[in-house]
Amino acid sequence: MRKKFIAGNWKMNLDNAAAVTLARELTRSLGDFVAADVAVCPSFVYLSAVAVSLKGGSITLGAQDVFYEANGAFTGEVSVAMLKDVGCTYTIIGHSERRHIIGEGNALINRKTRAALAGGVLPILCIGELLEERERGKTEAVLEEQLREGLVNISAQDMCKITIAYEPVWAIGTGKTASPQQAQDAHAFCRKIIADIFDKTTAQSVRIQYGGSVKADNAAELLGQPDVDGALVGGASLKVNDFIAIVKAGAKT
Ligand code: 13P
């Protein structure tokens, strides 16, 4: 049984005071809750402040991106060691907003993933198809390519440390959630590809989160699907009660 993993991606939202308050309220509400793994991923600039607010609770800290070089002349970038230094357990890599707004490709995403693994920060590797790709029947081809190219030169042992986040781009921030069946089908397909790249045991242990308009009122049904092992939550993770409800839905399924 894979323990559910609910992560809040705060994206480019909140200010220092609001991030600290949100983290503090979540920590107070959840206490030492362990029925699901929970992480929050604030902007880089608020990681340290949020880390302080999370102290004493069970919520872990994640970043929204990372660079693959260890240090040096890479203006504006943040290394894996820097993320560790401020207390990050996880980092999101290859989010659709970075793929489609910033222009990141699978090769870069793979380098970042390998660097995170080498430096001891657990990757949340995001994949997902555009609406036009789904409409043209290309969903599986896109997911397969993103997985195969994103997971190049990664060992089975390291694969077990990666969380895959399936986020159909058309469902992100749109209020259009994938149906539980669409999510289940995509997750089962991803698991099949992971089994093909690595092996069945590895594929069975990897957690695959769903992301895209997950809300308090649809979380239970999505998280109830056999291959949906958690959620990567955007908008609803900015509201204490909504995020807590999603976490609790994860604990029940
Ligand atoms: P929303 O939950 O706002 O649709 O965002 C999903 C997402 O992109 C999480 O990474």
Image (tube, helix red, strand yellow):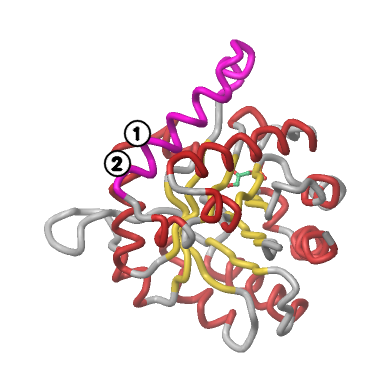
- Position of 79 relative to 150 (above/below): below
Q: In which quarter of the image is the N terminus?
A: bottom right
| 10 Å crowding of disc 2: few (<14), some (14-19), many (20+) | some
Is residue 198 inside the magenta stretch? Answer: no
CB contact under 8 Å: marks 1 and 2: yes
Q: Give the range drawn in magenta.
A: 130-153
- Position of 74 relative to 193 (above/below): below
Residue tagged by mark 1? 105
Mark 1 within 8 Å of ligand 1, using the beta carbon: no
| 10 Å crowding of disc 1: few (<14), some (14-19), many (20+) | some
Residue tagged by mark 2? 108
Magenta stretch: dominant secondary structure? helix
Instruction: Report the amino acid beneath label 1.
Output: Gly
Q: Where is residue 92 in the image (x, y as percent from the top left)?
A: 47, 54
Q: Nearer the viewer, residue 249 or 159?
A: 159
**Is 231 on the left-hand or right-hand side of 62?**
right
Residue positioned 34% across, 33% down in the render: 105
Instruction: Report the amino acid beneath label 2.
Output: Leu
- Position of 120 relative to 208 (above/below): below
Is residue 137 inside the magenta stretch? Answer: yes
**Is 198 on the left-hand or right-hand side of 205?**
left
Whether residue 195 is visible to the viewer of this picture, yes or no, is yes
Residue positioned 79% across, 33% down in the render: 181
